[in-house]
Amino acid sequence: MTTPFYTIGIESSCDETAVAIMRGERDLVANLVYSQAQMHARYGGVVPEVASRDHLRKLPYLVRDAIAEAKIDIRDISLVAATYGPGLVGPLLVGLSYGKGMAFGLSVPFIGVNHLEGHIFAQRLSDAEVEPPFMALIVSGGHTSLIDVAAYGEYHLVGMTVDDAAGEALDKVGKMLGIGYPAGAEIDRLASEGNPAAINFPRPMSGSPGFDFSFAGLKTSVLYHLRKHPREKKEDVAASFLASVVSVLTKKSINATKRYHRKNLVVVGGVAANAHLRDRLQTDGKEKGIDVVFPAIEYCTDNAAMIATAGAYHHIAMQESHPLSLGPQPSLSL
């Protein structure tokens, strides 16, 4: 009988402490996420030192509970995978150090996973999984990028934000509207009750050549509008702002997918959970003959399942492993 291959994945690049265990490359047997969002809400954003200390407190217990949920012994673990970048250096260091220590203690291989690649692998956890080649839109609080995925491990940057990420703009506009951190889900809810045509906010870089994004100017436009119209309905501001963000993301992504002759567009990252973005991309994609694929909602935001499946793939399919000297790389790119 073949001994099952278990990969434990660890994610701590920002304000989620997450641990998952994967059997083989696809069979998720444990998936735990602890969010620090409520802790950081009082500050209006993530405080790296606070995040790091909380990762230190929570990670050992999440590892223990994940092993129990998977119904295995710690000695059954065959591979340790941990995020090593990009992200906040302190939080990265916590998860990476814990993962390397576990690999050393268990005498098993170690894989450092690129957080952005992890998001791309998140779609492998869904029933609608597609294989490369495809176009990927990574859209989150820290990143907004279009990546042509020729094969797993073979990535070409097509476009990226030149200033704020889409998720960052959502959080900052949320703060203007008096919404707590993180603001994405609440803006999505408010927008459902507002009129997206109430305010004519700009669609930044929508008509420019290429596939780069910009959201800083849009954010400033909302700020100036609220100064002039302080009694404007929150619902209308949220709906009009979100309509602009969704319009730009959709147009650029669909056009890039067509330009690179890809049949599938994979949309990942925390903002991929946004209902308005999902609906618009699905509608426009269908009109253009493009299949738009999203992970399940729980795999859009930061999680360790995507880290475990990416790590398992690189080790099992690509025969890769990394030295325990690997350090955190907060500015890592694909």
Image (cartoon, rainbow, N blue to C red):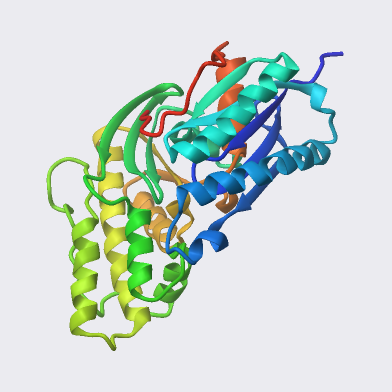
Q: Where's the C terminus, which quadrant?
A: top left
Q: Residue at x 38, y 51 (%)?
A: 286
> Does the rendering let one see residue 302?
no
Q: Where's the N terminus, which quadrant?
A: top right
Q: Does 174 appear above or below 15?
A: below
Quadrant of the rendered image containing residue 22: top right
269 left or right of 79 in image: left
314 left or right of 224 in image: right
- Residue closer to the observer: 105 or 25: 105
Where residue 220 appears, as percent x and y from the top left, is 20, 65
Q: Residue at x 53, y 49 (%)?
A: 51
Farthest residue, direction left: 208
Quadrant of the rendered image containing residue 259: top left
- Residue closer to the observer: 171 or 309: 171
Farthest residue, direction top: 319
Where residue 63 appears, as percent x and y from the top left, is 73, 37
- Residue closer to the observer: 246 or 37: 37
198 left or right of 168 in image: left
